[in-house]
Image (tube, grey):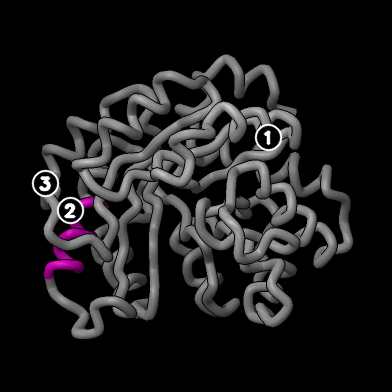
Amino acid sequence: MLVDSHCHIDLPEFSARLPQVFEDMQRNDVGCAVCIGVTLEDFPRIRMLSESNPAVFCTVGVHPENTDVTEPTVDELICLAGHPRVIGIGETGLDYYWHKDAPEWQRRRFRVHIQAAREVKKPLVIHNREATADMLRILEEERAKEIGGVLHCFTETWDVAQRALDLGFHISLSGIVTFKNAHVVKDVARRVPLDRLLVETDSPYLAPVPFRGKVNQPAYVKHVAEEIAALRDVSLDEIAVATTANFFRLFPLAKRSDRSDSNEK
């Protein structure tokens, strides 16, 4: 069994074909997927999706790219995270690519998420783009190591991966690892400890080869795992077993799903 640890199947791209998405997951032995929260406005839709399908879990958070949305408070995140299908806090972090002036509001929002995660003892789902130094510094200052989490869609160097691992975080690799010129990501895929590795699609974005340029979906996480297996010269089954075990260890509340328990290897 595989787990897609990060996707956005609540988006309009999937609204008319969710039954097919779930059928494709089952056919490719993808036992569950995590639908990631990016605004508080969208959270009810994500929560309902997770309530209606035992193969779907969710998180709550406000993505650092999003402006003109409800600003989260620690208390509100704590309240929303109390739902049994919410297994983590995020997507949160910093994005200086879209906000090149590195606004202080992003850093404040990031701290709010970390503080809420520490209160509810649920892992963080971290987004980072061109903000590595500040991201790592804030994780350290806010004692994020106490609850851990995952750096999703990891594209940084091995040195950055080591610092994240030292902070107790997992590394999640997306379809980017299958891209021909993704040499830095492939290097990390070879070197990250197998017990700290996750796989994801970030669907509908970043479809792996051979679907690059098309709409991504959770079933395609199998291609991410196959590439990592090839890079490490191990079997797909070894990557599947390890990354699935890592997921359930990092997100222990996910084990409350009967479907996930019955399919876990």
Q: Secondary structure at mark 3?
A: loop
Marks 2/1: CA–CA distance: 37 Å
Inspect the image, locate mark 3, and give the three-letter code of the amino acid beneath it: Thr
Q: Residue at x 77, y 61 (%)?
A: 227
Q: Residue at x 12, y 59 (%)?
A: 68
Inspect the image, locate mark 2, and give the three-letter code of the amino acid beneath it: Val
Q: Is residue 258 above or below residue 50?
A: above
Number of residues whose C-alpha sits closer than 10 Å to that of mark 3, classed few (under 14), some (14–19) or many (20 or more): some
Q: In x, y percent, where is residue 78?
A: 20, 35
| Image quadrant in which the N terminus is located | top right
Q: Which residue is mark 2?
A: 112
Q: Are marks 3 and 2 in contact (CB under 8 Å)?
A: yes
Q: Secondary structure at mark 1?
A: helix
Name the image quarter holding residue 134.
bottom left
Foreground residue, 41 or 165? 41
Marks 3/2: CA–CA distance: 6 Å
Dominant SS of magenta comes to helix
Q: In x, y percent, where is residue 195?
A: 66, 50
Marks 1/3: CA–CA distance: 37 Å
Q: Which of the numbered marks, if any, corresponds to residue 24?
A: 1
Q: Secondary structure at mark 2?
A: helix
Answer left or right for 88 relative to 71. Answer: right
The magenta-colored residue range is 105-113
Q: In x, y percent, where is residue 26?
A: 70, 29
Q: Which residue is mark 3?
A: 73
